Image (cartoon, rainbow, N blue to C red):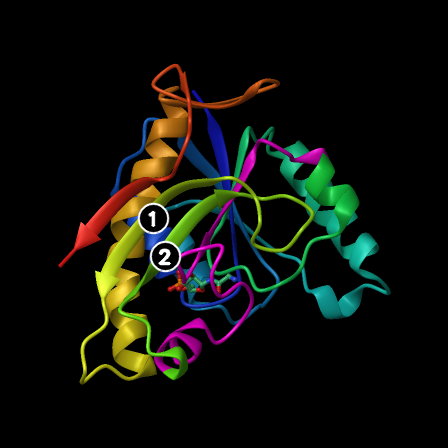
Amino acid sequence: MIKIAVLVSGSGSNLQALIDANLSGQIVGVISNKPDAFALQRAEKAKIATAVIEHKQYPSREAFDDVMHQQLLDWDVDLVILAGFMRILSAKFVKAWEGKMINIHPSLLPNYKGMHTHQRVLNTGDVFHGCTVHYVTAELDAGQALAQGVLKVNVHDHAESLADRVHVLEHVIYPQVAEWICNGTIQHTVDGVLYRNQPMQAPVQFCKF
Ligand code: GAR
């Protein structure tokens, strides 16, 4: 059975969706860089091991990442799921977990990498918005996209309403992709990413409109 660690910084609603999905893999631990993250309470309620590794207590990004790396090795983790983990990871850490680490980002990548995605979508006047699950590579928000949830922006939408609507999609696509990795539907190989044993050409789309 695939052993999963989830890295969080905040509320952890995506962690909750992963817990509730009863994946065929096992969530063996949750790491937070923030001691007051509500996600930690969710993990404890689900009887999942937690580790608080505060980035502020380490002299460099690399030193912080080394401690996380060791925790993941101690838990014998096969898959790392970033779920609202708001730290940029060092190239060394990303390399160590390449092909074994996924992230969810609140935009239709490659559009709107980085922060404040909902407001930026509104500022541009885009018709479509959503979220993307992707493998993590050293370049921020740039690894191969595995799935996207797509919604239509309403005239009445503001940044908060978009964030709420994107969250609903996130809670569908993230557990789905995690399960696909757990059961081998998605495979990261030396020849690239396979989906149902075929090279993955484009992310699987989930539309809500
Ligand atoms: C999610 O919307 C996720 O897409 C975003 O943080 C939120 C976490 O919510 N992640 C990023 O912006 C990463 N760049 P949650 O704590 O309720 O799961």
Return the x and y of residue 110 as percentages of the image width and height.
49, 55
Q: Residue 20 magenta-drawn?
A: no
Q: Residue 107 magenta-drawn?
A: yes
Could you tell me how far apart the alpha carbons at marks 2 and 1 are, in whole angstroms? 6 Å
Mark 2 beta carbon near ligand 1 (under 8 Å): yes
Quadrant of the image containing the N terminus: top left
Residue depicted at x 36% and y 37%: 177
Residue type for callout 2: Cys
Q: Are marks 2 and 1 in contact (CB under 8 Å)?
A: yes
Residue type for callout 1: Gln
Please state which of residues 173 and 110 is positioned toward the viewer in this rendering: 110
Task: Give the magenta-colored segment's residue range.
Answer: 96-122
Residue 186 makes an appearance in the image: yes
Which quarter of the frame holds ligand 1?
A: bottom left
- Residue under circle 2? 131
Left or right position of 173 against 79 = left
Please state which of residues 96 and 27 is positioned toward the viewer in this rendering: 96
Return the x and y of residue 72 as percentages of the image width and height.
64, 38
Please state which of residues 33 and 148 is positioned toward the viewer in this rendering: 148
The number of callouts visible is 2
Residue depicted at x 29% and y 52%: 149
Return the x and y of residue 85 as percentages of the image width and height.
54, 59
Element assignment for label 2: strand
